[in-house]
């Protein structure tokens, strides 16, 4: 598999996790795991910001309507997602 294929698998499988028409999926990191013949990747995409922070600075700036979330995903040689994890930067 090449990087474009990995990103397309993620777009197809995860598109329903965001209510946005264009979640702007991005492949952030990819590593092939030779010992188990799997890809371990990190992807990011946009979701609506459902938990806005209430800070004094927000009164003079525009609050972000969207936020980018990151997920670590494992994909096997048959192009199936076999792991989906929270990813903290």
Image (cartoon, helix red, strand yellow):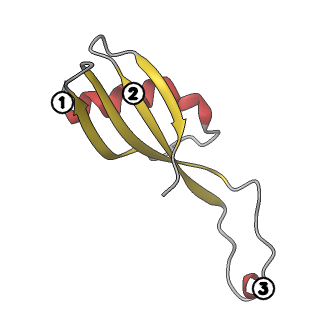
Name the side, left or right, on which 64 lies relative to 43.
Answer: right
**Residue 37 visible in image:** yes
**Residue 25 visible in image:** no
For the point 75% across and 53% down, which residue is it? 50
Judging from the image, what secondary structure is the residue with disc 2 in? Answer: strand
Q: Nearer the viewer, residue 5 or 85?
A: 85
The numbered mark, 1 or 2, whose residue comes first in the sequence reads 1
- Find residue 34 and report its horizontal and vertical position in percent: 19, 25
Q: Quadrant of residue 17?
A: top right
User: Does residue 9 lie above or below 87 as drawn?
Assistant: above
Q: CA distance from mark 1 to mark 3?
A: 45 Å
Q: Which of the two discs, 1 and 3, sits closer to the camera?
A: 1
Q: Which of the two discs, 1 and 2, sits closer to the camera?
A: 2
Q: Nearer the viewer, residue 7 or 65?
A: 7
Label 3: which residue? Answer: 59
User: Does residue 31 lie above or below 78 as drawn?
Assistant: below
Quadrant where the image shows the N terminus: top left
Callout 2 crowding tier (Cα within 10 Å): few <14, some 14–19, many ≥20: many
Residue farthest to the front?
35
Q: CA distance from mark 1 to mark 2?
A: 14 Å
Name the side, left or right, on which 21 lies relative to 55.
Answer: left
Label 1: which residue? Answer: 2
The numbered mark, 1 or 3, whose residue comes first in the sequence reads 1
Judging from the image, what secondary structure is the residue with disc 3 in? Answer: helix
The numbered dot on residue 74 is 2
- Find residue 41 and report its horizontal and vertical position in percent: 35, 37
Judging from the image, what secondary structure is the residue with disc 1 in? Answer: loop
């Amino acid at each position: 598999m090449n990087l474009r294929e990995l990103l397309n698998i993620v777009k197809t499988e995860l598109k329903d996790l965001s209510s946005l028409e264009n979640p702007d999926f991005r492949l952030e990191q990819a590593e092939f795991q030779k010992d188990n013949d799997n890809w371990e990747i990190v992807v990011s995409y946009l979701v609506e910001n459902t938990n806005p922070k209430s800070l004094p600075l927000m009164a003079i700036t525009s609050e972000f309507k969207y936020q980018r979330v990151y997920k670590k995903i494992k994909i096997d040689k048959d192009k199936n997602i076999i792991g989906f994890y929270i990813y903290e930067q």
